Image (tube, rainbow, N blue to C red):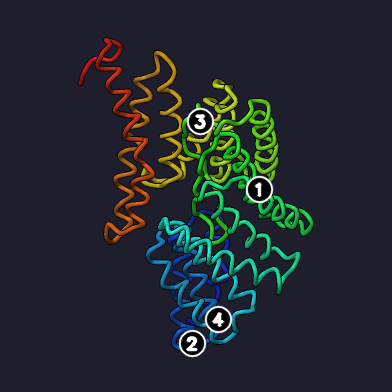
Amino acid sequence: MLLAAMMLVQDAPALEAAGRYADAERARRTHYEQVQRRGSATVAAADAAEKLADNLAMQLRLNDAEPLYRRAFEIRLAKLGEKHGDTARSLRQLAALAMARGALNEAGALARRSLDIQRAVSPGAMELAWALNAMAEVLAAQGKAFDAEPLFAEAVTIARQIGDPDLAILLNNRGNNFYRMATATVIPPMFRRRAGATRSVVAPTDMEDSGGLDPLRKRAFLTQGRDLLNEAMRMFTAASGADHPDVANLLNGLAANYRAAGMTAEAEDRYRQALSIKARFLPPDNRDRIIGEWSLGDLLATRPGLEAEARSRLRAAMAGAMESQARFRTFDAAASNELRSYAPVFATSIRVAWRLSLTSAVPAR
């Protein structure tokens, strides 16, 4: 029995990499319960709690993950002390959860504390790269994309020097930050990675708002961002194939970049590629899937003659957004924050439906 459980735990990373999160969860939970029985306040218990929480975060079950992340932090702080890399990692995970709740000041304090520890205990290590990324994501979420850029750049440099395969995630995040700088947009980080190692996913934004940025500078930022996203795409495709949800999210980011650059045909092509991948792998209430439907619908809404398809895509995004609320036990701050982020989906859908009602392009249902 014990041997079988150990084998399941060994298989869990491969199951998670394949997107079989529920199968991996069973292994992670069994291991956590076994370790708890041997000692509930041990470093091993903290490690098992973190791994189970990581799995739940990948499933976007952040309410379920948070108590486990907090327990891991409490044990590590008591057993290892403040100035330890594992304690710093726990702080980074808690910062990511605070961001998901929209508690940006709390997230910033936790991320800064984590970064200060990592700089002291692990200079040049990948854990420092993740701490830099976490702090950068908080700054970007606060609308400080230009302040975030040096931190994203340092994280990418560290990952390059190490040759870490997660360089692709950091390239994605920095590439999307150039989009933020070019369009004065806030892009929240999305999960499907362990908390604290998240990647950003671009949702539609107001293409006319570039914060007063000079057009030449805007174009340069978008070009730099595309170069980083294309490099990340090559890495993800080589590692996981062309039909992976991470590749789909990169396509979504590239599409948004092309759209901001005025390259509408290129944007539509990549939005369609991204959504075709997401539709095969992700359920309708998955945030990545919702953003895929929303992004394509939002673009099609600007193209004469495509309003009917735009309405269909936006309706799918709205249905997924409402269904996604079932992940929350109560309508708490995190649920409210997520639902608020979908407000543009509903607004755009109403505009498209209004335009269609004034034409005879699509018969009324």
| Distance of label 2 from label 4 (alpha carbons) | 9 Å
- Furthest toward the right, the residue is 161
Residue 41 - label: 2
Q: Residue 93: horizontal and vertical position, in percent? A: 52, 65
| Distance of label 1 from label 3 (alpha carbons) | 20 Å
| Distance of label 3 from label 4 (alpha carbons) | 45 Å
Q: Nearer the viewer, mark 1 or mark 2?
A: 1
Residue 79 found in image quarter: bottom right
Give the mark, 3 or 2, whose residue is nearer the N terminus.
2
| Distance of label 1 from label 4 (alpha carbons) | 31 Å
Which SS class for mark 4? helix
Give the mark, 2 or 4, whose residue is nearer the N terminus.
2
Residue 149 - label: 1
Q: Residue 231: horizontal and vertical position, in percent? A: 70, 41
Residue 209 - label: 3
Which SS class for mark 2? loop
Specify the amino acid type for callout 1: Glu
Q: Nearer the viewer, mark 2 or mark 4?
A: 4
Residue at x 64% of width, y 78% of height: 84
User: From the viewer's perspective, is 66 left or right of 359?
Assistant: right
Which SS class for mark 3? loop
Specify the amino acid type for callout 2: Ala
Which SS class for mark 1? helix
Residue 85 found in image quarter: bottom right
Pointer 1 with pointer 4, Cβ within 8 A: no
Up the image or down, 364 lies above or below 61; here it is above
Residue ID for mark 4: 76
Specify the amino acid type for callout 3: Asp
Give the mark, 1 or 2, whose residue is nearer the N terminus.
2
